[in-house]
Amino acid sequence: MNGNRILVLEDDDETLAFVSLVLRGEGYEVYERDLLLEHVAEVKYLAPSLMIIDVFQGAEPAGWEFIQHLKAHPATASIPIIVYTAGSLTAEQLQQSKHQGIPVVYKPFDLNELLRLIRSLIE
């Protein structure tokens, strides 16, 4: 894994562009997608050192299922993930994220806090 590569999955174009711009300004290599990836193989190919995933794609919490699929696959299970969302996670999802060591950041988020969290997970 490249210690500098971040994959951002976000369906809101403005948020995606903003987060990507900030991360590139911090020296990270950023791969961005406005949709969830179809296959774990795509994540394995990109080999990110961290993923930032908006769990709500439209009104559906499809990102949560995608994260669980990543965590269940040996090739991607160890990639750190940050969940960020404008929606609410269920109590079960919050418990599962805590158990899996997946931090949850709520939008609107503090940019400095997000950057500190990214650094702590990558370094």
Image (tube, rainbow, N blue to C red):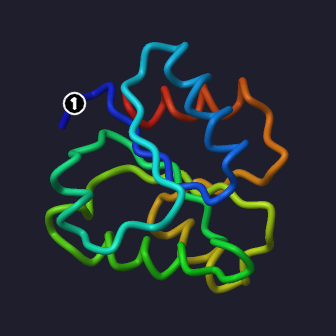
Q: Is residue 79 left or right of residue 82?
A: left
Figure disc tally: 1
- The percent coordinates of residue 11 (x first, y second) are 62, 60
Q: Residue at x 44, y 37 (%)?
A: 121
Q: Is residue 100 left or right of residue 95?
A: left
Residue 12 sits in which quadrant? bottom right
Q: Is residue 32 left or right of residue 49?
A: right
- The percent coordinates of residue 68 (x first, y second) are 40, 78
SS type, badge 1: loop
Q: In this view, does 28 lie to the left or right of 19?
A: left
Q: Residue at x 64, y 86 (%)?
A: 92
Q: Residue at x 72, y 83 (%)?
A: 90
- The percent coordinates of residue 99 (x first, y second) are 49, 70
- The percent coordinates of residue 56 (x first, y second) are 66, 71
Q: Vertical placement of 19 versus 63: above or below?
A: above
Q: Which residue is drawn at 46% across and 52% down?
A: 33
- Please identify the quadrant where the C terminus is shown: top left
Q: Vertical placement of 51 versus 93: above or below?
A: above
Q: How crowded is mark 1: few (under 14 residues within 10 Å), some or many (20 or more)?
A: few
Q: Which residue lies furthest to the right in this view?
A: 108
- Identity, as a three-letter code, of the amino acid under mark 1: Asn
Q: Nearer the viewer, residue 53 or 101?
A: 53
- Please identify the quadrant where the N terminus is shown: top left
Q: Label 1 belongs to which residue?
A: 2
Q: Vertical placement of 7 versus 96: above or below?
A: above
Q: Which of 14 and 94 is in front in this view?
A: 14
Residue 93 sits in which quadrant? bottom right
Residue 34 sits in which quadrant? bottom right
